[in-house]
Image (cartoon, helix red, strand yellow):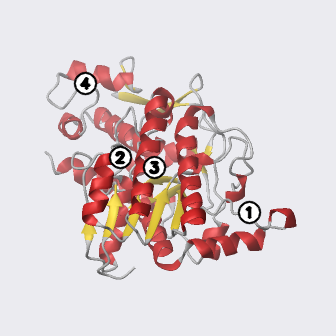
Amino acid sequence: MEKNSKIYIAGHRGLVGSAILKNLKEKGYTNFVLRTHSELDLTSQQAVNDFFATEKPEYVFLAAAKVGGIVANNTYRGQFIYENLMIQNNVIDAAYRNNVKKLMFLGSTCIYPREAPQPMPEGSLLTSPLEYTNEPYAIAKIAGIKLCESYNLQYGTNYISVMPTNLYGPNDNFDLEKSHVLPALLRKTHLGKCLEERNWAALRADLDKNPVEGVNGQATEEAILDILAKYGIRVNPSKSVNSVSIEIWGSGKPMREFLWSEDMADACVYLMEQTDFEDLIRVNSSSIRDNSRANEVRNTHINIGTGKEVSIKELAELIKEKVGFKGNLVFNTEKPDGTLRKLTDPSKLHQLGWQHNVEIEDGIGQMYRWYLGEVNQRR
């Protein structure tokens, strides 16, 4: 990519897209074409085709997607598979029809089987059944990988797919119903701290920034306490002091890997600058020992992760420490745990020359400081 190459980032306001845009600007790239969801509906084939025909971007980062945590994935199954398939099909095909030089498709490590070997190498894709709760989303992302591979093989395009592990960082989704585990835990812990300190000003500022089921900072104390209790943030009335507990789904035993979103963005830009589809074929060929499969092109996607993991319980305790919450963490074992381990094997990424920088302990502190700044701006 040249510094003045025309670059389209689909989903530039989200956790992933905003981090990629920031990284590109810091590296000196200047020519961006950007559209919000209200300006361009990526599920509309006609709208996407018209956009590409008019703007003619040279490079595309496909970071737009319908995403959410375990509750959202399991509740909105139809929406997750339909919208993600539509978004990626429309953008990838329009990129081909308008001679885009290079495209990066961003997926997720939930593409791997529930019982995949740990850590999960790229070659474990499609080797056994998926985790049920996020199966629709995972199938959509697998289809995106295969669409990129198939267009490359049939049409000679240069599309690469990357599968980031669990991400966290600035511009994350803190909606208590639909967010992933880390931002949800961070916000719940912050709200719990506000309750135990009786800091209603900070609590109301948080709800004004991001209302919960329509309950904002202008609601009565009773309404606020009721909605927080629904999401597991409860004041214990039997205590003489203002004791607060936070409920967490599952046993706390599942292990998860987390990657700072700005590290992920740096990996994406690095790969767009340094790696082509042909390079990935060569990397894969060097690892195939079965001669009968020597001519097959599979699993050219790249894991983006740290190769390190932490239990949900350890994560919750770490967030509790960073936020300064003194109450109790209650694990509800009647709720599902999801997959017990989900650790990526980032060997291919390391072989291509990139490794992460931010460790989870530092990242959570940075994220909480960012979150407080966002809330305080709206007081």
282 relative to 147, above or below: below
In the picture, measured across the screen, residue 257 lies left or right of residue 48, that is: right
Q: Say which residue label 3 marks.
A: 89
In the picture, measured across the screen, residue 154 lies left or right of residue 283, that is: left
Instruction: Tell me how far mark 3 sits from mark 2, CA to CA.
Output: 9 Å
Q: Amino acid at mark 1?
A: Glu
Which quadrant of the figure contains the C terminus?
Answer: top left
In the picture, measured across the screen, residue 109 lies left or right of residue 262, that is: right
Q: Which mark is residue 296?
A: 1
Which quadrant of the figure contains the N terminus?
Answer: bottom left
Instruction: Tell me how far mark 4 sits from mark 1, CA to CA.
Output: 57 Å
SS label for mark 4: helix
Q: Amino acid at mark 3?
A: Asn
Residue 344 showing in the rendered view: yes
Instruction: Tell me how far mark 2 sits from mark 4, CA to CA.
Output: 42 Å
Q: Position of residue 301 (x, y in %)?
A: 60, 61
Instruction: Tell me how far mark 2 sits from mark 1, CA to CA.
Output: 31 Å
Q: Are marks 2 and 1 in contact (CB under 8 Å)?
A: no
Label count reads 4
182 relative to 346, above or below: above
SS label for mark 1: loop
